[in-house]
Image (cartoon, helix red, strand yellow):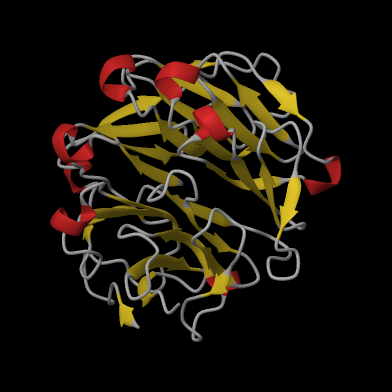
Amino acid sequence: MTAVAGPVQGSIGMHQHVYALAASPNFAVDGICFAAGDQGVYRSDDGGVTWNAALASLNLAEPLPATTVVLSPEFPTDQQLFAGVPGGCLRSSDGSASWVATVFPAPPPTISQIVISPNVAVDKTVIAGTTADGMWRTTDGGADWYPWNFGLFDLHVVSLAVSPDFAQDQTVFVGTETGLFRSTNGGRSWRELPLPAWCAPVISLAISPNIASDQTLFVGTEAHGLWRSHDGGMTWEQLAADQIQGAVSNIVLIPEDPVKPHLLVVASNLLISRDGGTTWVLSGSPDIGAAEILAVAAPMGLHRGVPLLVALESGGVQCIQITH
């Protein structure tokens, strides 16, 4: 195990809590990744070995907490990223060298999740979920945001995922404290899906890269493990109930094989599936319990021997190696 950041100025010290991690789509070449936490947004250019404050250009008098950070799917060329901060969001078009702040209307919501359209270069669409004010949407790249909550009966958004085929199907899924909702018109209206009521809250989500044909999605629940649907969320099956128990706080899906994508879940253990969720192996470091992990990123896939970036409950970010 290698510490990703030590207690030096400008790094993510072990006293800092990190809530979200994001890596460049070209991470294997550029080594760029970001972290969002209670001390702000941080950027690494060497694969997570060293970190620097990414909000330095704002000349803030005190740290600005960030709840989430996401990168454009075209980040290597467009250098776009978004961060959720108290009362609104920050957006950058130069890889975090400079930022534009958008303050949402009063009372300003707390952003919990942000997703970017896979076709953002054309549709300019970014969607945000909040802790108590439902869903917000922009179609001009983040300059103007509007609430879109028709049919969303629970405004406490916990998880959010956009279809890889968004340009064609306009589909977005939202997990809330009481259930799961789907939009098929780009986030303008919502319909509740029949996930068993006792499974809520839905605290993590992942969508098959081949959803146009297989209609597969995965949800992680707060107390009832991991579930999979093969029909767009109409019927469900629980996966690996003997191995994946309790809260599933994170699901990482790697679309290496569009038919059987690789999956990582953070539950009572850190587990990996390389056949779309059918079989699972325990992987990670014996020194880190899954309950300690707040966020995880797998920027180089889920093969044995490659690194995972993990944000820990105890503070800071570390790098662990996939062992199986």
* Residue 140 to residue 6: above or below: above
Residue 2 position in % (x across, y down): 30, 81
Give the image location of residue 62, x and y in percent.
Answer: 32, 51
How many marks the image carries: the answer is 0
> In terms of depth relative to the viewer, which is nearer, 302 or 48?
302
Looking at the image, can residue 139 be seen?
Answer: yes
Specify the farthest residue to the bottom.
287
Q: Quadrant of residue 304?
A: bottom left
Q: Is residue 223 above or below residue 149?
A: below
- Give the residue drawn at x 39%, y 27%: 117
Q: Is residue 293 left or right of residue 96?
A: right
Quarter of the image where one finds residue 141: top left
Q: Residue at x 52, y 67 (%)?
A: 293
Residue 109 in view of the camera: no
Q: Position of residue 195 (x, y in %)?
A: 77, 38
Q: Position of residue 262 (x, y in %)?
A: 46, 56
- Relative height, residue 122 to residue 132 (above, below): above
Image quadrant in which you'd find residue 125: top left
The C terminus: image quadrant: bottom left
Left or right of residue 156, residue 78 in this image:
left
- 149 relative position to 6: left or right: right
Q: Nearer the viewer, residue 138 or 324?
A: 324
In this view of the protein, which residue sits in the foreground, 201 or 186?
186
Q: Quadrant of the N terminus?
A: bottom left
The residue sitting at 45% across, 63% down in the picture is: 17
